[in-house]
Amino acid sequence: MDNIEVAEVATDSRKKLDESLFVPLEGENFDGHDYMKDAFDRGASAALWDKKKGLPDFLPADFPVFFVEDTLAAMQELAKAYREKVNPVVIAITGSNGKTTTKDITASVVGASFKTHYTQGNLNNQIGVPLTILSMPPDTEVLVAEMGMNHFGEIETLTKIARPDYAVITNIGESHIEYLGSREGIAEAKLEIIEGITKNGYLLIDGDEPLLRHIHLRDGVITCGFEDHNDVAITNITISQQSTQFELSDDDSYTIPLLGSHHALNASFAVTIGGLLNIATKTVKQALTELELTSMRFELMNGKNGSFIINDAYNASPTSMKASINAVKHLEGFRQKVLVLGDVFELGKNSKQLHRTVADSIDESMTAVLTFGKDADEISSAVFKQTPAIDCRHFTSKETLLDALNAYITKDTLVLFKASRGMQFESFVKQVIDPSQ
Ligand code: ADP
């Protein structure tokens, strides 16, 4: 067979596939092999094919097909080989919360000095990471890859493909505890990232997390966090309505257009990597002010009647919910603060108890806690028990919650919306934002 050149690798037969290698993947509900006709009609120029399956009759005899045991594993192998061929500096980011934000901040910082390719959307799993790698232009100097996981072994697979020079574990929370058993299990699963780190590579971790402290990786571990003992200690945090300012151990002061000390931690990873890549501090600072972030992550918006809305309804875990509430606590200049909280999914058998822990972060600086969902009432009732002065109410319909909320939508009120993505809290946000924005 002659050499074939492909410009892209694609798994979705609904897209334009000119000069693409089509990789049919088998999922729970669909089998990509059934869509070969679409892929061919849309211009695919070659395909991988599961050797256990028959080839469809319509394919011309000269259409290049590569028979493999397992199309996903073959695509992962291709990604591994392509990573070695392009050979960029690779930064891999995992953690229970803050992956996307840290990825965005890091991409912005390194993108100021290097030709940088980074994860788009939520392409952070067993399929998404290989696709991210395979879509990197040949002249990429730095690759920033976000790595997500639900089960043991997934990060190990991904890190062995991406072979990071810098790996970040942003934090250990409770996400996917259902599959991983405990926070210890989650830490263990994230630490799989070490398996793929290059010889002189670095691991950057949340140094305030006791479950990560035992890690020794030659001299290559850098701890970032708020406690004094960290290699990169975050101090003097001030949060205003538009930004968070903080200092790092280099005594420099940094400003990010994101609200909350947890984002200072996310930024500290990016700043540290920027320093290791010899990017000038001035350039790093500038890049931080120009961040472009994926939406629905702690977005501050104008609400109706002069209120302010924080849309943080993209996803949630108890840790991230507490982090967002803490950020709201620190925001000054509001007469009333209202928390609209919903269920956090995938918490397994301890779900109710984990919801109750959110109450620990809520104090009398909040005016109201309005909840909706199957387990979210645990939050409102726990808050009511500890601080009866707060208006704590649980709702079984979104309409009645909205009625109650509307009474609060007045000048100088701040409202936080936070729940798992599946709760569709953006429907509330739509109803209370200022229509003129
Ligand atoms: P991920 O990609 O890991 O889901 P995101 O960057 O999308 O994380 O952030 C999701 C939410 O998690 C944010 O809106 C915020 O509430 C919370 N969060 C972000 N960073 C951290 C952190 N370092 N620690 C705790 N919570 C965080």
Image (cartoon, grey):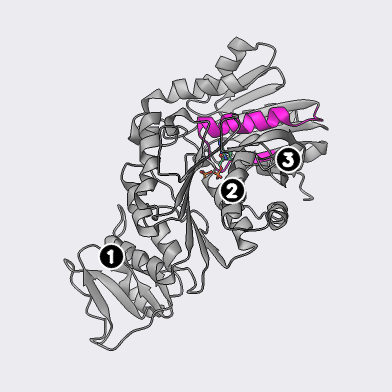
Q: Which mark is residue 74?
A: 1
Residue assigned mark 3: 245
Secondary structure type for disc 1: helix
> Is residue 316 rendered magenta in the image?
yes
Secondary structure type for disc 2: helix
Residue 285, percent across and down? 71, 52
Apparent side of residue 396 relative to residue 235 in the rendered image (left or right) = left
Observer-side mark, 2 or 1, equals 2
Whole-angstrom CA distance, mark 2 to mark 1, is 35 Å
Q: Is residue 246 visible?
A: yes
Q: Quadrant of residue 20?
A: bottom left
Badge 1: how crowded within 10 Å, few (<14), some, or many (20+)? some
Secondary structure type for disc 3: strand
> Is residue 396 rendered magenta in the image?
no
Apparent side of residue 116 relative to residue 311 in the rendered image (left or right) = left
Q: Residue 272 carries which label?
A: 2
Image quarter of the N terminus:
bottom left
256, above or below 83, in the image: above
Residue type (three-letter) at the residue carrying disc 1: Ala
Observer-side mark, 1 or 3, equals 3
Residue type (three-letter) at the residue carrying disc 3: Gln
Whole-angstrom CA distance, mark 2 to mark 3, is 16 Å
Q: Residue at the spot x=44%, y=67% of the render?
A: 87
Whole-angstrom CA distance, mark 1 to mark 3, is 45 Å
